[in-house]
Amino acid sequence: GAVVSQHPSRVICKSGTSVKIECRSLDFQATTMFWYRQFPKQSLMLMATSNEGSKATYEQGVEKDKFLINHASLTLSTLTVTSAHPEDSSFYICSARPTGYTEAFFGQGTRLTVV
Amino acid sequence: QKEVEQDPGPLSVPEGAIVSLNCTYSNSAFQYFMWYRQYSRKGPELLMYTYSSGNKEDGRFTAQVDKSSKYISLFIRDSQPSDSATYLCAMRTSNTGNQFYFGTGTSLTVIP
């Protein structure tokens, strides 16, 4: 299967600061990547679809200005949580589907804790 | 009604038992079906995927799709403590591009 790498795996930041999470496709090019948020014992909640070279598509209720997505290359998408608050603490996961594959592959996830 | 319904459990079984995990869905256009396993604090990893109706076997795992009933299952034979995880079903149609629809996940514990 294809490999998606996400970094960092965990981060603690102070309230009001910004945090950047990287998602890389290691052995394939990804024109589209997905960002999910997952609360404890709940399923994945799609936040946005990241498109290489164009603006991301955000799901209803997700603040574009708070969750900045940049997909500047075919192997890298970043999610920046701006002015983080404790309620932003969560598990963030990215995924991508290689061309020709039916299934999507996920990164390892990033546990964000805002104190 | 959610697109995909999955019993969250938790499900607890003794080691060696056969486990049956299920999802139902409402959209008859779904054609691609996947099962992911997620360990605590990790990203989901793909276990199996199937296309349309039928069975697919891979080692101790069997995925089954019944499109007429809009029902998919994952069977785990000879369950092991290492199978303890949350299992997510996912599906997509052929025409929605990259959109995946996920179940809520079923938490499984295999007791030694």
Image: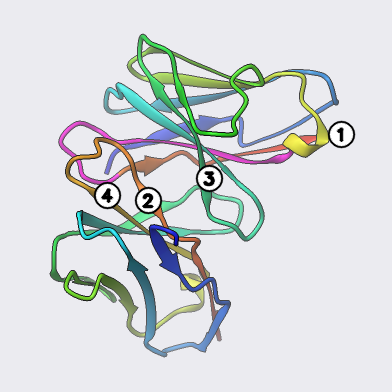
Residue A36 within the segment the image draws in magenta: no
| Residue at disc 1, secondary structure | loop
Query: Is residue B90 positioned above or below B65 on the image?
Result: above
- Disc 4 versus disc 3: distance between alpha carbons? 16 Å
Q: Which mark is residue B92?
A: 4
The boundaries of the magenta stretch are: A89-103
| Residue at disc 2, secondary structure | strand
- Disc 1 versus disc 2: distance between alpha carbons? 32 Å
Q: Which residue is mark 1?
A: A115
- Disc 1 versus disc 3: distance between alpha carbons? 23 Å
Chain on which label 2 sits: B
- The residue positioned 28% from the left and 73% from the top of the image is B71
Q: Marks 1 and 3: which is nearer the front?
A: 3
Q: Nearer the viewer, residue A32 or A8?
A: A32
Badges 1 and 2, same chain = no
Three-letter code, disc 2: Tyr
Q: Marks 1 and 2: which is nearer the front?
A: 2
Q: Residues within 10 Å of mark 3 (few under 14, many from 20)?
A: some
| Residue at disc 4, secondary structure | strand
> Residue B17 occupies which quadrant of the picture?
bottom left
Three-letter code, disc 4: Arg
Q: Which residue is mark 3?
A: A45
Badges 1 and 4, same chain = no
